[in-house]
Each structure stands twice: as structure tokens, then as C-alpha cells.
Image: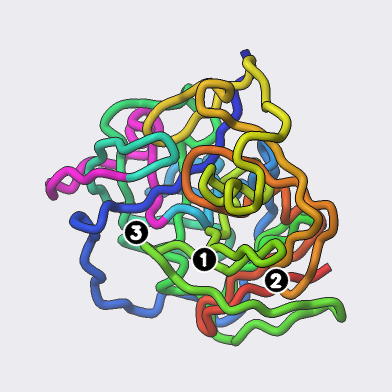
Amino acid sequence: MKTLPVLWIVCLLPSCMLPYPPVMPQGPVADVAVPMQLRAGTPHVMASINGLPPIPLLLDTGATLSVFEPDVATGCGLLPSGGRRLQIRGVHGTAGASQAVMSTMDLGLWHTTDVPCLVRGISGFRPGGIGSAILGMDHLRRHCSFMTLDYQRNSVELGFSRPFQPTRSMATRTPLRWVNGMPVIRVSSGRVSWDAVVDSGSTWGIVIDQSTAARLGHAHDGMSMGEGLILSGVGGSVRADQVGARTIQVPATTLCGETYPGATLYVMPGPKRIGSRFWQGTRLTVDFRRSALWLER
């Protein structure tokens, strides 16, 4: 069977949210640009943890905090900090995790310290596989003014001291809200609208749940994603046919100020989200300072 990672919504349960410590400036004056590698269609960057050789991190806008599988954490010298164990919510349920801290993280020319993270209690992915080491939004949101994922040039740009300015003539700006530490925008199709997480950690495109599909008039139709597809994420793995995963076609979908006729939507478990498949070929910028999402083509 074919196994694909669906999404890492690494969001802390509301009762377990970590306190926000005082933020000290940790960013360079100039922007930092680093190469981006697509693995299973999702963006990865190389980063050094605790001064050790760089490892690939899944750059996941759909993750609140950075999360490591136990074997990766051991290799990076990450030890539980002694705080209470937490529960993280994923696509297929919840999983236990311990709090830890990266003493240092080097991402390109950005050297930062005391980066909060979580270490999962039980390994859910193969060693070195997709999702075994995740860089979430919490620390970036605290210290960066913006983050650009350039799916055309395979690069990531982090801004620190300056506000974001688009570099291409075709650019749209969309308001976003932060919900449980994740960026959320509004999506619509016809008279139906919904909130969706901007989720670079998902391999899919526009994903909706069963109730939204029913509101769109597609309660039971569409094309099955097949019996041989395994969907993996926080909380375990499931067969696509067991959870009714399917695709549907709608006349048009509107998001980020643009309308896309004949759009394909994925009906799958988990939160409504927009994954990296949709953002391919664009420059996607999360503007932390102005709570906006920029899309450049």
C-alpha cells in the first residue's frame, strides 16, 4: 500500500498551551535566505540543532510548535525539560509529547537560542521519514517579521527588521487570523464559505471535511482515493477508503482574492486546510507583522 503524510497539525490542546516567555531580539538585521527542498511535495530546510550537523526540517505552517520523533530528538541531543507531558492534536487523534528546548538552532545565517519544542513519546514515523522533524510557527512568529516560501525558486526567505514588500506585479494580500497558533484564511465556493488552515505541511491541495462537502451539495458523490492509500499523521494511520477520503469537483473556489474555476477539493479527515499542492508555482508569504497572507505569481 502507498503511504502518504496528510498533515501535521501540531496544535496543543487548549488546556495545555505553553506560556509565552519574554521575547528578546534574536534576528539579524538583514533578511536570511536558505534553500528549500520539496520532499513528498512539502517544504524542508536544513538546520543545525545544538551545534550538530544539519538535518532536514519540515517547514510546517500548520504546526504550532516544533516537534521531533524520539530517535531524531536523541540524535540532536534534545532532552525533556521536566515539564508536564502534553497532548498534541493531529489529523487522526492525539498523541503524548514531552516539552524540550533546542539550546541553539542555526538556519542559514540565523542563529537563535532557547527554541521551545516537543518530543513525541512514541515514534509514529519511520526514522528520517517525512514528519520526523518539524519546524513549527511559534518561534518564527515571535522573531520574524515575515516568512516567504518560494515554490518556484525552491527557497525560503526570513525577514526580521523590515516589513514585507512583494517583488512581483501579480500579488494579492489576504487577511489571516491566528487560531491555536496556526494561520487561517477564508475560502468560499458559491454561497458556501469556511475557514481553512494555511498548511505547508500537507501534501494535498484544498482539503475540506465531510460536513463542508455536504453543504456544497456533495454529501456522497465524488471519486474515491482508493483502498491502497494509507493516510498518516499525528494520531496514527488510516486507510483512505475506511475514512471515505475522496475528491469532488466544484464550479469554482475563491481564496486569496482569486477565483479558480473547476476546482478539485479533497474530502479527508482533520481540519479544513490548504496544502502545498495548491501553493506550487507561487511565492507564499506569511506576514507575521501585519497578519496577512501574500500570494505572488
Classed neighbour count for the residue bearing mark 2: other residues with Cα under 10 Å, few (<14), some (14–19), many (≥20)? some
Q: Residue at x 80, y 67 (%)?
A: 259
Instruction: State the residue position of label 2.
Output: 256
Q: Secondary structure at mark 1?
A: strand
x and y percentages locating residue 84 in the rendered image: 12, 47
Give me the C-alpha separation between circle 2 and circle 3.
31 Å
Q: Which residues are magenta?
A: 64-88
Callout 3 amino acid:
Val
Q: Secondary structure at mark 2?
A: loop
Mark 3 and mark 1 lie on one chain; the one further toward the N terminus is: 3
x and y percentages locating residue 44 in the rendered image: 61, 46
Callout 2 amino acid:
Cys
Classed neighbour count for the residue bearing mark 1: other residues with Cα under 10 Å, few (<14), some (14–19), many (≥20)? many
Residue 33 visible in the picture:
no
x and y percentages locating residue 268 in the rendered image: 56, 38
Instruction: State the residue position of label 1.
Output: 184
